[in-house]
Amino acid sequence: MNMTKTLIAGLIVAVAGAAGACEVPKLPVIPAKGDNAGKEDALRATFMQYRQGMEAYTQCVQTELTVAGGDKAAASIKSAAVLRNNAAVAEVQAMDKLFNDNVGALPGAPAPRK
């Protein structure tokens, strides 16, 4: 019985640690449309770093779900992973729109996978 409790406690610690392993990148500052003249290249570089960070984040969340058992993972773990992933995708879509409206479209920048 003690071995079972120890194993379960170890799994809980591992899952909790893994949940914190994926870090959401910091949101970039996107100035108003009229306030970015001459800053477009720097803004694009910063924004691309953000997007790459979000792609890495969603991949990390998806890897965590796979490690936890994928479709066979506990419902709470699966639900949390799906919510985290979908929130990240929605954030990127909103930031893409803001960036496109205020700075201009990024060439070939697909959204992270759902």
Image (spheres, rainbow, N blue to C red):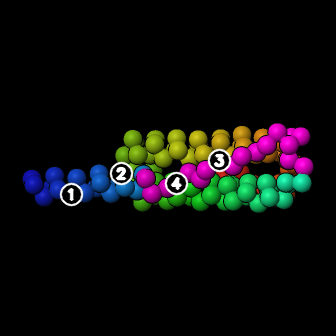
According to the picture, the residue beneath numbered tag 1 turns out to be 7
> Comparing marks 3 and 1, which lies closer to the viewer?
3
Inspect the image, locate mark 1, and give the three-letter code of the amino acid beneath it.
Leu
Dot 1: within a 10 Å radius of its alpha carbon, few (fewer than 14), some, or many (20 or more) residues? few
Query: Circle 3 is placed at which residue position?
Result: 27
Q: Which residue is at a point 59% across and 43% down the rendered structure image?
A: 86
Q: Is residue 17 above or below residue 93?
A: below
Identify which residue is drawn at 39% across, 41% down.
Answer: 76
Say what secondary structure mark 2 lies in: helix
Front residue of 24/43: it is 43
The span shown in magenta is: 20-37
Separation of marks 2 and 1 at Cα, in angstroms: 14 Å
Front of the two marks 3 and 4: 3
From the viewer's perspective, tell me whether residue 67 is left or right of residue 54. left
Mark 4 and mark 2: Cα distance apart in space = 14 Å
Q: Are marks 4 and 2 in contact (CB under 8 Å)?
A: no
Q: CA distance from mark 4 to mark 1?
A: 27 Å
Q: Amino acid at mark 3?
A: Leu
Residue density around tag 2, few if under 14, some if 14–19, many if 20 or more, within 10 Å: few
Residue assigned mark 2: 16
Q: Nearest to the eye among marks 4 and 1: give it.
A: 4
- Could you give the CA–CA distance between mark 3 and mark 2, rounded to whole angstroms? 24 Å
Indicate yes or no whether the magenta region holds residue 21: yes
Give the foreground label among 2 and 1: 2
Residue 53, by quadrant, is bottom right
Q: Amino acid at mark 4?
A: Glu
